[in-house]
Image (cartoon, helix red, strand yellow):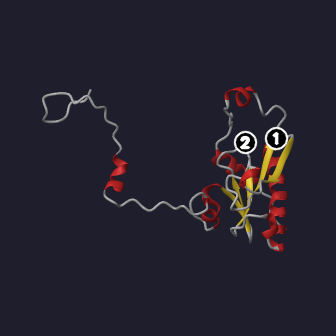
Amino acid sequence: MARVAGVDHEDRLERLWVPHRMSYVRGAEPAPDDRCPFCRMAEGGVGSDIVVTRGETAFVVLNLYPYNPGHLMVVPDRHVADYTELTPAETVEVAQLTQQALVAIRSVSHPHGFNVGLNLGGVAGGSLSAHLHQHVVPRWSGDANFMTVLGDTKMMPQLLEDTCDLLRDAWPQED
């Protein structure tokens, strides 16, 4: 139990010290940025540290909640929800970046296979369905082990920063 300075008795309250919240109390806390996270990344804002590469109309970013090491997404810069809304140039670049992702991941991780695909709409599993993104997930035989199946826990053997560095170094250079 805590003693309060200048008081002869204990007040029986536990204290959790959170001095970083004083900016909120003083009204100096920045307004939350509720914009689309992919749009922020496209502009070079929050989350850009895990962007692997950028093209003219799209970019490649690691998934913050990866299924496996190297799980990344190919994302058009423009905020569109449906594949049919892409321009021909965006469609080509998303396809090219996806091919390059496969090459880069194969060179650093040697997966046994891949899942590549789009979740169009929330009911299809798209948690950020308002901004189209194509998943590229490297797969290995037995990568869904007992921890995932029984413990609802995914074992990740590599940090996102390390994965990002490996993929950046291995990204195919255009001729």
- Circles 2, 1 touching at the beta carbon (< 8 Å): no
Instruction: Name the quarter where the C terminus is drawn.
Output: bottom right
As drawn, is 4 to the left or to the right of 159? Answer: left
Q: Relative to the observer, which residue lies in front, 131 or 56?
A: 131
Q: Label 2 amino acid?
A: Tyr
As drawn, is 164 to the left or to the right of 104? Answer: left
List the residue tagged with mark 1.
139
Give SS at disc 2: loop
Give SS at disc 1: strand
List the residue tagged with mark 2.
67
Q: Position of residue 75 (x, y in %)?
A: 73, 61
Residue with the most extreme right position: 112
Q: Position of residue 70 (x, y in %)?
A: 74, 46
Q: Residues within 10 Å of mark 2 (few under 14, many from 20)?
A: some
Q: Position of residue 104 (x, y in %)?
A: 80, 52
Q: Residue at x 22, y 30 (%)?
A: 11
Q: Relative to the observer, which residue lies in front, 168 or 151?
A: 151
Instruction: Name the quarter where the N terminus is drawn.
Output: top left
**Disc nearer the start of the sequence (2/1):** 2
